[in-house]
Image (tube, rainbow, N blue to C red):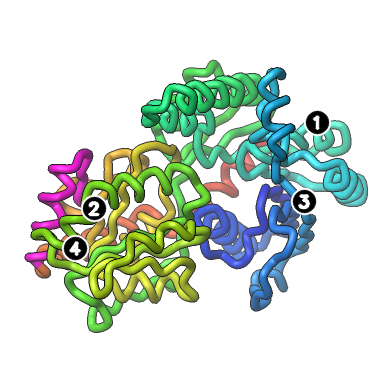
Amino acid sequence: MRILILTHRAPFPQNGGYPIVVGNTIKGLVALGHDVTLISLNIKKKSAPRERDELLEKINYTEYDIDTRVTMIEAVSNLFTNNSYNIDKYYNAGFEKLLFRHLTDNKYDIIQLEGIFVAPYLDIIRRNSKAKVIFRAHNIEHQVWQKLARQKSDPFKRWYLRLLARRIKNYELELLNKFDGIVAFTEQDKTSILSFGTKIPLTVLPIGIDLSLYKPDHSKEDFPSLFFLGSLDWLPNREGIEWFIDNFHKDLTDGDLKAKFYVAGHNIPEQFDDYEVLGKVFIHGEVDDALEFVNSKSIMIVPLLSGGGMRVKIVEGMAMEKCIISTSLGAEGINIQNGKNIIIANDTDEFHNAMRKCITDEHYCHEIGRNARRLIEQQHDVNTITHLLAEFYQSII
């Protein structure tokens, strides 16, 4: 098959959840012999120099720079419309012209939209291609904003987030039946999509990873150590880690949680440096090698309070045999067993008890980690997942 994939951000380097999911999908499709074209919006006007990914040698790739920054005037004026600037800001006339040329010059069998932020280009696709259009729902976007709103105590922030959620919901519900098929990552998201009255073919395929890249080595592990890894420009991540630090900073520095704590990821605000405590709390920012960072630590913290879809970092952490403490929401969609291959904690007491148990029992942590790895081997191998995705394509064609 000839497959065109559209993304709202460049998936290179593959150092975050969205890029990893897209990159692994493309690797799997190429391995199956499919001809893949990837066209990506690049929301960073000045991309940092990077090593050329070997995957680029196997696909047709085009990257188009856009500026998604919204001015204060635009944000205020948007309040008096029914549009969602969260989505509208990804529309660009120049990118649409680029896409038009690709559609008229090439005949694709499948066009896959990776998430709602490239949905504004559906009309140009329908007018200029007979390809079947697949929508991969990385989450139910309006539910992310609804959950964020519920966490806010400030009345204005809560009102504003609810407004955004309502506009995004209207857009999502109007959109869903316009595709030829939908791929969701979790059964929870499938249930939500069906409840919206979706009639088109819908399947659930979890995140798949290349297991050959995940090589745990406990001889390099600092035990006990706690760590968080995630991009803080995604609001649910920032909300979760701020909640965690607000509740446990004192316990980690002066209390009974005798373990070093590390925070790493993209776009960590400068004010997070204030949380650093010499020899106890470390704010790293972006790390050069995320898997090496994970390998060197022992207990992964996922304090997610809002959001949706499936967390790539948990799948990766489990593949690296990490003992993971997560909220139920953070582990959503993964076929976990609490106390066997992960530890679920949904409030401060549960998190505190789980961390205290883990930092005092290395054998227990390693047992959780080994069971986690077995789960990923059984249910998240990218080769198996991508084969099922290709079968879904064929059923639509």
Magenta segment boundaries in residue numbering:
343-361
Residue 274 lies in quadrant? bottom left
Choose the circle earlier in sequence order: 1 or 4: 1
* Numbered mark located on residue 66 in the image: 3
For the residues marked 1 and 3, what is the alpha-carbon distance in whole angstroms? Answer: 20 Å
Residue flagged by tag 1: what amino acid is it? Asp
The residue tagged 1 is 123
Front position in the image: 14 or 257: 257
Q: Is mark 4 on a helix, strand or loop?
A: helix
Q: Nearer the viewer, mark 2 or mark 4?
A: 4
For the residues marked 3 and 4, what is the alpha-carbon distance in whole angstroms? Answer: 43 Å
The residue tagged 4 is 253
Relative to 310, does residue 320 appear above or below in the rendering? Answer: below
For the residues marked 1 and 4, what is the alpha-carbon distance in whole angstroms? Answer: 55 Å
Q: Position of residue 83 (x, y in %)?
A: 70, 23
* Crowd class of label 2 (few under 14; some 14 to 19; many from 20; radius 10 Å): many
Is 127 displayed left or right of 394 in the figure? right
For the residues marked 2 and 3, what is the alpha-carbon distance in whole angstroms? Answer: 37 Å
Q: Is residue 348 one of those drawn in magenta?
A: yes
For image coordinates 23% across by 55% down, the residue present is: 249
Q: Position of residue 355 (x, y in %)?
A: 15, 56
* Crowd class of label 1 (few under 14; some 14 to 19; many from 20; radius 10 Å): few
For image coordinates 40% across by 63% down, the residue present is: 273
Is 200 displayed left or right of 248 in the figure? right
Front position in the image: 138 or 394: 138
* Crowd class of label 3 (few under 14; some 14 to 19; many from 20; radius 10 Å): some
